[in-house]
Structure formats: structure tokens, C-alpha cells
Image: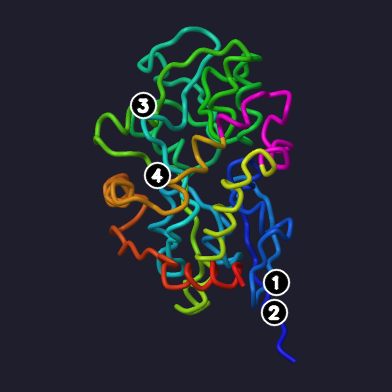
Amino acid sequence: MITDKPLSIAYTPDSDDAFYYDALETGRVVMSGYQPTFSREPISVLNESAKRGLYDVTAISSVVYPQIAQRYAILSVGTSVGRGYGPVLVSKDRLQIDDLRGRRVGVPGIPTTGWFLLRCLCPDAIPVQMPYDEIADAVAAGKLDAGVMIHEELIYYPQLDLHRIVDLGAEWCLRHDLPLPVGLNVIRRDLGEDAMQRICAMIRYSLEYALGHFDEALSRVSRLGRGSEGQCTERFVSMFANADSVRLPSDARTALQTLFGQVVDLGLSPAVPPIDIIEGSSWDSVVRQRKAG
């Protein structure tokens, strides 16, 4: 008797990541040959888990990849790409970026892409690590001078009467004339080439299914992030679960090379790793044929 292999998948507790996997988690798409289990953890926790190889498939901050490249390859599906947007730096009072020298700024983990962008633009700010969904409230309460917004927080913060200092993602895109790959989806190399390709294709089909049944999937994932009261789920999911997420485009791949070079320059990694991307292409047609059959 052939039994399904266990497959551990981890993603952030936010609506866009949940959207990728909604069809798989709800059984609308079946991952033939595998029994997936799903875990949700903040990106700072997932970054550390990836360093230990805890999950077979996991979301990570893009800037962490050079540290885990020997163990994980990049999936072409599930990348969060900002085109002229990304993590946003906000404050209660109207401040300029230079005002943050020597001042406390909340960040959702070190290293994360949000922290990295702050470090590049304002290296003299004092980063304070805290859960991503507590930073905006801490800034509003005056406990922090400023904070880096990620996930739904980056469009929710005006509801707390906070002010944008700078869109860190937009600034990076402008300076490099490239989109910003904020987060990656990676897979353990020791699963083997055939398995990696097959799993990639199945995750892509899950995302395509959600995009094809958008309102239905959105209603389920809207319980995450700021929830229905936040009134930002649809906009946020559209920003980070889209055609760029279905298949990583060429300009975002170029951007990864640029970003990894900056990670090395900052001393977070000794060298830019080979950018091995699992396409899943050879399995895409198989997945569709089985569905049609």
C-alpha cells in the first residue's frame, strides 16, 4: 500500500500567504502523493526556522535567502513582489527620514526585508524588534518614534492616524528601476528535483484556483491580518497575490541578484548565492490533465 508522504508547509499569518494555499488547505486542490500540514508563524520566526531547515516549504524574507541557500531552493510561485511599493516607514508626528537618527524604530525582526530597507536608508536609527502587528499600535501610543509596516499594516496604518515618512519599498524600486521581491517561497533541496518540481506545480495550481475563485477565497482568508474590520484585505491580497506570485517574472529575478548583492555588502552573507529557481513547468501540464480527467 502506497501512502502519501508528509510535507510541512509554513507561511505568515497574513491574508496574501493564506490566499496562496487556500485551495490546498480546504481540499479544493489535492496534492497527489503528499499529505501537507500547514503552520502559520510570523516572518521573523520563519526566517529562524529556515536556518534550521524546520519546514519542507516555507516563506522567508528575501534578504535571508543567502544564509539558507545551501539547504533551500527558490520556488517560482509564491513570491511577494512590490512594484513601486513595499514596507512603509511611519510615525505619529510628521517626521523626515533624517529625524530618526538615534531614535527608536520598530521593525518586524532582524533580519527581515523591512529592517534591511530601514538599515540601508537610515543606518543610524535604533531598530527595536517586536511582533509586526504590534508596531503600529506602539507608534500610535508614543512608545516608538517610528515603525516599519509590513503585511496588511502597510495599508492599515492611516486608520491609526499615523503618517508615512517614506515608502521604503517604493524608494528601493525607484533607486534601482526594479520591482522589490519582499518575500520568497523556498523548498528543501533534499526532497529531490522531481519532488520539488511537482510540489511547485501544485502550489501554483492552488494559487491559480484561488485567483479564479477570488471572492470565495478572499472571504476565507479575510479572517487573518486586520480582519474584515480593517477593510484592507482585498486591496492587500491584490498587491501581493497576483501574476508576479504565480510565476516569478524576469525583472524580479534580476532584482534578487541586486538585493542579494546588497545583503553581502551589509555583511549578512559572505557571497551572493547561485539563484536556483524551481519552475515546476514540466509538472504544470500534468496537474491540469489530472484535474481535467
Tag 4 residue: 181
Amino acid at circle 3: Cys
Tag 2 residue: 4
Foreground tag (2 vs 4): 2
What element does badge 1 sit on? strand
Give the quarter of the image for residue 156: top right
User: On screen, 4 above or below 16?
Assistant: below
Q: Earlier in the sequence, mark 2 or mark 4?
A: 2
Is there CB contact under 8 Å for labels 2 and 3?
no
Amino acid at circle 2: Asp
Is there CB contact under 8 Å for labels 1 and 2?
yes
Foreground tag (1 vs 4): 1
Q: Earlier in the sequence, mark 1 or mark 2?
A: 2
Q: Residue at x 57, y 15 (%)?
A: 158
Amino acid at circle 4: Pro
**What's the CA distance linking mark 1 and mark 3?**
45 Å
Tag 3 residue: 122
Tag 1 residue: 35
Q: Residues within 10 Å of mark 4 (few under 14, many from 20)?
A: many
Q: Would residue 26 be found to the left or right of residue 34 on screen?
A: right
**What's the CA distance linking mark 1 and mark 4?**
29 Å
